[in-house]
Image (cartoon, helix red, strand yellow):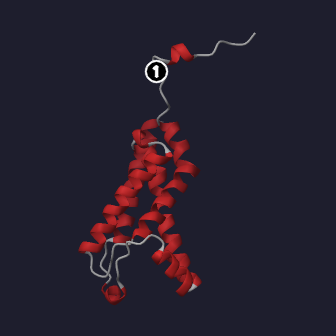
Amino acid sequence: MRAAAMLAALAGTVAFSVVLARLTLEPSPASVALTYSNVHPGQSIRAYLDHGTVREAARQLGGNLLLGVPFGVLLPVLVPQARGLARVAVCTTVVMTLVELVQGALVTGRAFDIDDVILNTAGALLGYLLLGRRLGRAVHPRRRHWWHRFTRRSPAG
């Protein structure tokens, strides 16, 4: 069962990587004039909410949230050392920052946006809390360590 879960998680990671690459690393020549880097947290989120249509804001903000969800689900299954809210947040922030840096430096019509990193990380945390934590524990149960012998509670009675 663990092998099947690991294989499914690996396949999911490959699929997620392909989708991530298609959505973030494909050139967008039509957007070159609209492209600007954002290093101020909240700036582009505020711009979408204040000046964009509801549909465009939902597409951009919701899309970035959803893009992070698979990371929060798959990471604890593939890397048991990355279980935990803080560890998932750190791993997601590092990976998504690297994606944004590559996107901003090398891809035509794309730019670095710190708000994308924030939204992707929030999505990963959501995915972890909804499903990733349970899946990670199911595939990689916690081990009993030698010191648990001394902390075991005696039955009442």
Would residue 115 be visible to someone looking at this image?
Answer: yes
Residue at the location (44% across, 41% down)? 4
The residue sitting at 48% across, 72% down in the picture is 42
Q: Which residue is mark 1?
A: 145
Residue reaching furthest front?
40
**Crowding at mark 1 (Cα within 10 Å: few <14, some 14-19, many 20+):** few
Mark yes or no: residue 69 visible: no
Q: In front here: 3 or 130? A: 130
Total count of labels:
1
Point out the residue furthest to the right here.
Answer: 157
Could you tell whether 108 is left or right of 20 in the image? left
Q: Is residue 93 above or below residue 42?
A: above
Q: Quadrant of the C terminus?
A: top right
Task: Pinpoint residue 41: horizontal percent, then vertical percent.
Answer: 45, 70
The secondary element bearing badge 1 is classed as loop
Residue for point 27% across, 68% down: 102
Question: Is residue 55 rendered to the left or right of residue 118?
Answer: right
Q: Is 60 left or right of 81, judged from the image as shown?
A: right
| Depicted 109 relative to depicted 9: above or below | below
* In the depicted structure, whether residue 68 falls above or below residue 110: above
> x, y (%) of residue 153?
63, 16
Q: Position of residue 141 (x, y in %)?
A: 50, 32
Is 55 above or below relative to 123?
below
Q: Which residue appears at 46% of the width and 59% of the height?
A: 121
Give the image location of residue 90, x and y in percent. 41, 51
Amino acid type shown at disc 1: His
Observer-nearest of 150 and 61? 150
Front residue (pair 84, 1): 84
